[in-house]
Amino acid sequence: MQLDSVTVRRVSMEMLTPFTTSFGTQTHRDLLIVEASDGEGSTGYGECVAMAEPLYSEEATGTCALALQEYILPRLAGAEISHPREISELLAPIKRNNMAKAAIEGAVWDLWASREGISLAKALGGSKDRVDVGLSIGIKPTDAELVETVGAAVDAGYKRIKIKIAPGRDLEMLREVRREFPDTVIMADANSAYTLNDIELFQAMDELNLLMVEQPLAHDDIVDHRHLQAAISTPVCLDESIHSYDDARQALELESCRIINLKIGRVGGLAESLKIEQLCRESGIELWCGGMLETGIGRAHNVAIASLAGFNLPGDTAPSSRYWAEDIIEPEVVMTEGQIEVPTTAGRGYAVKTELLEQLTTSQFTVPM
Ligand code: OSB
Ligand code: MG
């Protein structure tokens, strides 16, 4: 197949509640929705998951829009594509810019699956009918508010609860949650807010029976994490540090983590995600699908990849109602008994509400292919 045109829309969506991490507070999502058309009536959608500012990683919404327009989409113009795997090969000469690359790559996977008449999950080799869902809870002003939020999440059926931590809002806060919820599956995510000087803090957390501690140290580190992992019994999970199959392989070789959080955007797309899934499955490393406060389009891609067997822990794939008054897809992503059903219809399995998408669009450009 050939692409006929690609439209990139910059979209602003208000979140139901602010989301605070060690790097800042999000009240809106400013993101890109990429639509790839084959000119024969089929379209595919991808979502660029970069944050509005480069505070989680070096990419940001504006840099991704520029990268797509100036460097990434021109490389795909005129290409004859027989399988979506070829997109990452065509884009390989461009270093990093993973979230920008993944947005168009995901749209092409969706388009290809639609044309083949198979679900995105099936196109990827997924085997599960439903995926287990965990919730990520941001930093709350008080322990009482956090305890209340964790209680509501347990009642809603989430299979594990992730709690964001930051210096000053860590050990005592987690102790309080553990006292209130002695049997709940709980983990912590630091978003790279600590250094090796904090080893004793993480050693003290060992007594809390956390499922894992996610990205405790620098966003670009795999060496210091190795020293931390050797000094604590709680499994270390890497998020920010893993940008590729090779990063994952090196982290496993160094024993820098025992668990990987895979985000499709952070690793540059679905083809790279498949390589990491195979690596983890074959080496017995636990794996789960992370989230970036996506709209339903990004969530649909996350649910599809999480349906592969290697994803053996609940992912951050909370349903539409967690973040949005109205999602841009229909039906909305729903959770039943802590699980989301993997769609079996062609492509991503959810229709895009194109009128709502237009309303939320703040700027856009179309590149003829
Ligand atoms: O570190 O996993 C993270 C959201 C934005 C940026 C980074 C992270 C997160 C989350 C949210 O934890 C998970 C979700 O999308 O529900
Ligand atoms: Mg994280």
Image (cartoon, grey):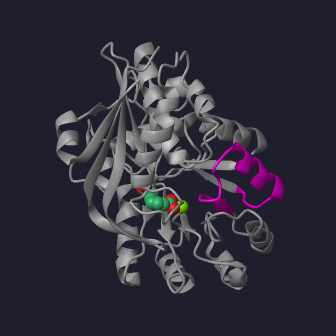
Q: Position of residue 209 (x, y in %)?
A: 63, 70
Left-right relation of 242 to 156: right
The answer to whether any part of residue 302 appears in the image is no
Q: Quadrant of the C terminus?
A: top left
Q: Position of residue 98 (x, y in %)?
A: 55, 46
The answer to whether any part of residue 297 appears in the image is yes
Q: Residue 6 appears in which quarter of the rendering?
A: top left
Nearest the viewer among 102 and 339 is 102
Picture layout, residue 304 above or below residue 57: above
Left-right relation of 152 to 87: left
Q: Position of residue 341 (x, y in %)?
A: 41, 36
Nearest the viewer among 38 and 193 is 38
Picture layout, residue 119 above or below residue 165: above
Q: Position of residue 41 (x, y in %)?
A: 30, 15
- Asked if residue 335 is among those painted magenta in the image, a careful observer would answer no
| Bounds of the magenta segment | 236-258
Residue drawn 65% across and 59% down?
A: 241
Picture layout, residue 256 above or below residue 34: below
Residue drawn 46% across and 20% down?
A: 112
Residue drawn 34% across and 24% down?
A: 43
Picture layout, residue 179 above or below residue 162: below
Residue drawn 56% across and 66% down?
A: 187
